[in-house]
Amino acid sequence: MQAFDATRLSWPMDWDAEFGRKAPLFIEIGFGNAQFLIDLAIRHPEANVIGVEISLPSIKKAEKKAQTNKLENIRVIHGDARLALWGGMPLNKLQRAYINFPDPWHKAAHHHRKLINGTFLHLLATRMAGDGILEIATDDPGYQEHITEVLESDQYFQSQGDKTFETEDLERIRTKYELKALAEGRECHYYHWERSPQAAENSFEYPEEIDMPHIMIQTPLSLDDISERYNNTHNYPGDTPVRHLQMFHTVVMDELREHRPALLVETHIAEDPMPQRIGLTIQSRPDSQVLIGLHEIGFPRPTKGIHLAAAHLARWVLSLDERNKLKHHNLAVELTG
């Protein structure tokens, strides 16, 4: 069984090709020790089963259990569930989605981290088949109230019965966490919902991987001059917030495999669905020029957000001296203005 990194998925994935067959696609989000996930794959050999989990030890457990049970109809994704769905899942593909005992994030400051909200359900609806099934389980009273409120106000899913939830489900396997909750006297709530007839506009376009950013600037300034004028953090709010953090002196290898002095700018880009922490470089070039580009450390994926971050850095460099002149660039965003 192959484990995928959510940040390295194709946008989107061809899951039929990956499994080597066309079959109903199931997903479990946050599979923990993989007990439910493995049982799902065993009980449904006719389905291709995907598990998404942020915990690397859980990924290893799932791989070992799948190997022990000789399961070929299962794959796991390590990383964020929103990214796995938004970037890696084709439209109208998922037949079933399971979310078992998601982290309730009790602290008020952490409520925004709750997985289940209106935006997530909208995203999930765009990736689910018209007759897709959504099942959720929780033992947390506060999260149960939150899930109930979100589902009952959602237009893309509807209950399969006359109740919002049940407090017993004898057909599902009892997971280790579920048994612990019941033993400690916590009541579990089970939501059996399905995709409603309401069409879901795809507001979650697939990310696009574009060319590596490349900006050449003519300048009389040295790298030391540029570094001396840099302060700690440059913030650029907007639809895709960008933060340029610390700047360091370094050395990079150019296209001729020659080492050149450079400045490295630690940068954070809050781009949906894949925020990235990257390094932008300002390289010293011949003829009083500097080249602004993307360092390959960490294997970044050059998206529009990265081009935007490079544009912010280029504008700042251009503003340092009236003699600075833009020579050329390949950015997918506006550089002037």
Image (spheres, rainbow, N blue to C red):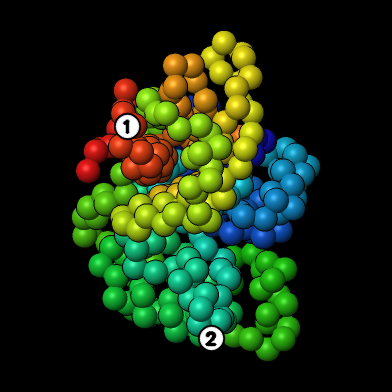
Q: Quadrant of the C terminus?
A: top left
Q: Nearer the viewer, residue 60 or 326?
A: 326
Q: Give the total of numbered labels.
A: 2
**Residue in view at x 49 percent, y 49 percent:** 230
Q: Nearer the viewer, residue 175 or 217?
A: 217
Q: How far across and down, in percent of the image, does residue 41 sit? A: 61, 47
Q: Nearer the viewer, residue 336 or 160?
A: 336
- Determine which of the numbered discs, if any, sits on residue 323 in the image: 1
Is the residue 249 above or below the residue 32 in the image? above
Can residue 69 be spotted in the picture? no
Using a 10 Å C-alpha cutoff, classify the residue at mark 1 as few (fewer than 14 neighbours), some (14 to 19) or many (20 or more): few
- Determine which of the numbered discs, if any, sits on residue 4 in the image: none
Give the residue at mark 2. 141
Using a 10 Å C-alpha cutoff, classify the residue at mark 2 as few (fewer than 14 neighbours), some (14 to 19) or many (20 or more): some
Q: Secondary structure at mark 1?
A: loop
Residue 299 horizontal side relative to residue 230, left or right: right
Is the residue 103 above or below the residue 6 in the image? below
**Residue in view at x 53 percent, y 71 percent:** 137
Q: Nearer the viewer, residue 112 or 235?
A: 235
Residue type at tag 1: Arg
What residue occupies the far bottom of the structure in this picture?
Answer: 185
Residue type at tag 2: Pro
Among the 4 quarters of the image, the one containing residue 34: bottom right
